[in-house]
Amino acid sequence: MEKLGREEIEKILPHREPFLLIDEVIDIEPGKSIKALRFVNIKEYYFKGHFPENPIMPGVLMLEAIAQAGAIAVLALPENKGKLILFAGIDKARFKRIVKPGDTLIIEVEITDFRRNIGKAKGTAKVDGELACYSEAMFAVS
């Protein structure tokens, strides 16, 4: 599939600013896998308080970016158009690297199981090839 920009992403994912954390999709196999980007900018709302003198992207937002990428992969299937996808659980979340303004998160998600509107996925967020965050998650499509 072709690359997807913000406009195409918004046609698939219900999230909007300031909580849409995917800027571009560079590769997608609907229902199976996705590779997406998040350009981390100093103007992000959370940097005012996390932390003013040492801005660091919160780990929970890295997890959310992974989840949003995975949601795009699942919601890109024609039968899921217009549906909502929700977390059902997060396992094995690990944070390995600080993410700062100016970094580009390269997010990769593999859907490992998906049946009857319940699924599992594994995802990573990397900066310059270095692992920043890893997680496994369960999700539900409604």
Image: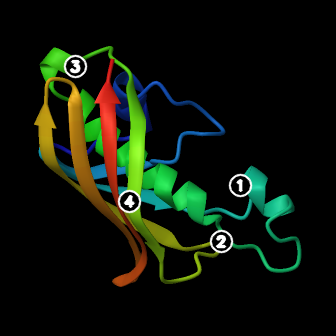
Could you tell me which secondary element the residue under label 2 belongs to? loop
Q: CA distance from mark 4 to mark 3?
A: 24 Å
**Residue pictured at 14% horizontal, 23% vertical:** 116
Disc with the residue nearer the chain's start (2 vs 3)? 3
Amino acid found under the numbered disc labelled 1? Glu
Q: Which residue is mark 3?
A: 80
Disc with the residue nearer the chain's start (1 vs 3)? 1
Q: Residues within 10 Å of mark 1 (few under 14, many from 20)?
A: few
Disc with the residue nearer the chain's start (4 vs 1)? 1
Could you tell me which secondary element the residue under label 4 belongs to? strand
**Is 89 or 63 nearer to us in this picture?**
89
> Which x, y percent locates residue 72?
30, 37
Amino acid found under the numbered disc labelled 4? Asp
Say if residue 134 shows up in the picture: yes
- Determine whether 133 is above or below 29 in the image: below
Q: Is residue 57 left or right of residue 52?
A: left
Q: Are circles 1 and 2 on residues that touch, CB within 8 Å?
A: yes
Which one is in front in this view, the residue at disc 2 or the one at disc 4?
4
> Which x, y percent locates residue 51?
82, 71
Q: Which residue is mark 2?
A: 101
Q: Which residue is mark 1?
A: 44
Q: Which residue is mark 4?
A: 91
Disc with the residue nearer the chain's start (1 vs 2)? 1
